[in-house]
Amino acid sequence: MSAATHLPGSCRICRVARLVVLGAAALVFLMPYLWMLSTSLKPQSEVFASSLSLIPDHWSFLVNYGKALSRVPMGRILVNGTVVCVTIVAFQIVFALPAAYALAKLKFRGRELLFGSVILGLLVPIHALSIPLYAAAKALDLINTLAILVIPFVLSVFAIFQFRQAIKSIPDDLIQAARMDGMSELGICWRVVLPNIWPAATSFAVFSVVAHWNDLYWPSVVITKTELATPPLGLLFFRAAEAGDDYGALMAATVIATLPLILLFLFAQKAFIEGVTSSGLKG
C-alpha cells in the first residue's frame, strides 16, 4: 500500500527530471542557431559587443535581411537547391527501391556478395571520386549546369541499405499473396513494398535533402556562376560580395538558407523518427 502510494509521486519526479534533462540538451543543440538568429537581427556594432545578449539593443532586421535578399539572387539560389535536392531524392528512390527489394526478398546466387559490395560502397566518399567525375563532366560540357549537381548522386548505396533493412521486416506471406494475385515484381515493389516502408523512405529523403542542401564541396568544384549556386555556395558568394565583414547580413542569409530544412524536419518529424526506428539493423 505504501509503495503504491509513493509510485505516482516518484513517476512525476522522474518525468519532470527527464523533461529537464531533455530541455537542457535541446537548448545546447539549439544555442548555435539561436545565436545565429540573434546576430542576424543586430547592427554591426553589436555583433562583437562584450555583452552576450541574444536580444539586440537596436534592431537591424530590415537592413540585414534586405542585404541578404539583394546582394545575391537568394530566391534563385533557394530554387536551385530545391530543384537539385528533389531531383536527387526522386532518382535515388527510383533506383534504390528495386535494388533493395531484390536484396531483401529475392533469392539468387551472389546476393550476399552483392549486399557486401553495397556496404563497401558506404565507405567511399565523394571526395575520392571528384577528379574522375570532374574530368567526365568537363568532357561532356556539364560544368556550370544543375545536371552535374544531380548526376553523381542518383544512385545511393545508403538508400539501398536502409530500404533493404526496412523491407526485410515485411512478411513474406504478403509478398506471396501479391504474386498469387498476378502482380509483377516491379508492381509488388511499388504498390506493396513502398507503402509499407513509407516512413523509412521519408527518413531517407530527409537525410538526403539535408546532405545535399548543405553540400559545399561538389558545387564549389563544378559551379562558378552565382545564378547556378546552391545555398551553401550562395552563402560563400555572398560573403565574398560583403568582403566577409558584415556578419549581421551574413547570418541573415544563413537563416534564410537553413529555414527550409527546419520546416522540412518539422513537417516530416513523425515519419522521420518512425522510419529511423523501423529500419534499424536487422539480419
Image (cartoon, rainbow, N blue to C red):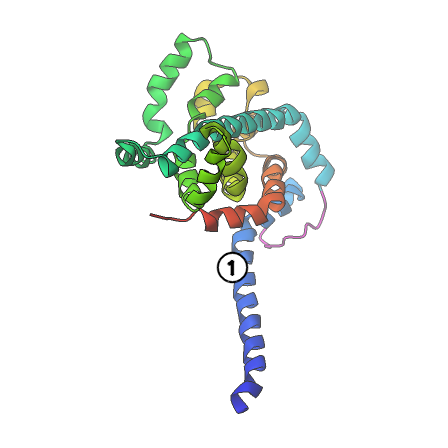
Q: For the point 54% across and 71% down, which residue is it?
A: 17
Structural crowding at the residue carrying mark 1, measured as other residues with C-alpha within 10 Å and reported as few (<14), some (14–19) or many (≥20):
few
- Quadrant (top left/top right/bottom left/bottom right) for the N terminus: bottom right
Foreground residue among 266 and 196: 196
Total marks drawn? 1
Above/below status of 35 relative to 235? below
In front of the other: 215 or 34: 215
The reply, left or right, for residue 71 in relation to residue 193 is right
Q: Give the quarter of the image for residue 69.
A: top right
Q: Is residue 233 left or right of residue 164?
A: right
Q: Please name the amino acid that badge 1 sits on.
A: Ala
Q: Name the residue that disc number 1 marks.
A: 25
Q: Is residue 53 magenta?
A: yes
| As drawn, 118 above or below 7 | above
Instruction: Please say whether residue 66 is visible from this viewpoint.
Output: yes
In the rendered structure, does residue 153 fall within the stretch colored magenta? no
Q: Is residue 94 left or right of residue 246?
A: left
Q: Residue at x 47, y 51 (%)?
A: 277
Q: Which residues are magenta?
A: 48-59
Q: Which residue: 56% across, 28% down?
A: 86
Q: Measured from the top left, where is residue 148 in percent x and y?
A: 47, 18
Quick check: 278 above or below 152? below
